[in-house]
Image (tube, grey):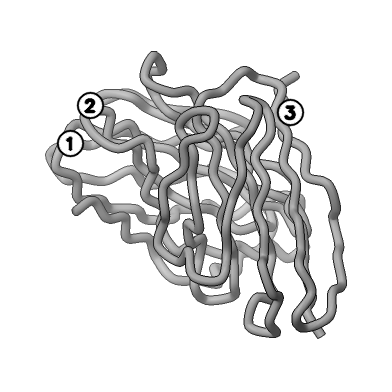
Amino acid sequence: DVKVTQSSRYLVKRTGEKVFLECVQDMDHENMFWYRQDPGLGLRLIYFSYDVKMKEKGDIPEGYSVSREKKERFSLILESASTNQTSMYLCASSLGAGGVSYEQYFGPGTRLTVT
Amino acid sequence: GDSVTQMEGPVTLSEEAFLTINCTYTATGYPSLFWYVQYPGEGLQLLLKATKADDKGSNKGFEATYRKETTSFHLEKGSVQVSDSAVYFCALSDRGGSYIPTFGRGTSLIVHP
């Protein structure tokens, strides 16, 4: 059974802290994605990566950075957490160029609260 | 650019009622189409997909047909259950271009006993 795991389901951090969200997939997928989900706004793409050490900005990259040192792991970093980054964070992965339908597989999400 | 429009919710139904959630799309290429479901407190999971015109995707009693002439991919179920209460997302991936899918805003479904 394919699986995407995220390091925490719930996280509470203080304003100004550096926050790391980890995501691991076991499907040997080339592509990995970080989204945030907020009520009424749907899914918004923060960053994605199509290969190890490669990254591309999504729609809302400000205040975030990412790291992909290994194919199976994609980390989202909040350099200095702020209250407006309180949200549900979803990681996803998908096949790369060889795939046909590019369906995504999602992790369970991390609900981050910044106080 | 690509876009997906789905009906706003919440959709509120009684158990065993018929469900339709409308989804229309615009795409520059020849997309694959998807429905994802998100149960409370969880991530999204793929519900069904269709990769070419007139394909019908189906799973767990849900189905949707890829209609190229009307650029639609409406989700239907003949008899909903309380356990179907969730948020449903329509999405497309344009195989000729980006790896990044385009999602609709999501439609919340609430099923009452």
Q: Amino acid at mark 2?
A: Ala
Residue A30 in the figure: left or right of residue B70:
right
Residue B113 in the figure: left or right of residue A32:
right
What SS does tag 1 mark? loop
Query: Closest to the observer: A94 or B58?
Result: A94
| Image coordinates for residue B39, horizontal then vertical, percent | 71, 53
Residue that label 2 marks: B53
Residue that label 1 marks: B68
Q: Nearer the viewer, mark 3 or mark 1?
A: 3
Estimate how packed mark 2 is, as few (under 14), some (14 to 19) or many (20 or more) residues with alpha carbons within 10 Å. Answer: some
Depicted B102 relative to depicted A24: above or below: below
Q: Amino acid at mark 3?
A: Lys
Q: Quadrant of residue B31?
A: top left
The CA distance from mark 3 to mark 2 is: 30 Å
Residue A42 in the figure: left or right of residue B6:
right
Q: Earlier in the sequence, mark 2 or mark 1?
A: 2
What SS does tag 3 mark? loop
Q: Nearer the viewer, mark 3 or mark 2?
A: 3
Q: Are marks 3 and 1 in contact (CB under 8 Å)?
A: no
Q: Quadrant of the C terminus of chain A?
A: bottom right
Estimate how packed mark 3 is, as few (under 14), some (14 to 19) or many (20 or more) residues with alpha carbons within 10 Å. Answer: some
Q: Chain of mark 1?
A: B
| Image coordinates for residue B97, horizontal then vertical, percent | 24, 34
| Image coordinates for residue A68, horizontal then vertical, percent | 61, 37
Query: Closest to the observer: B24 or A5?
Result: A5
Q: Quadrant of residue A97?
A: top left
Instruction: Give a yes or no on whether discs 2 and 1 share a subunit.
Output: yes
Residue that label 3 marks: A3
Q: Chain of mark 3?
A: A
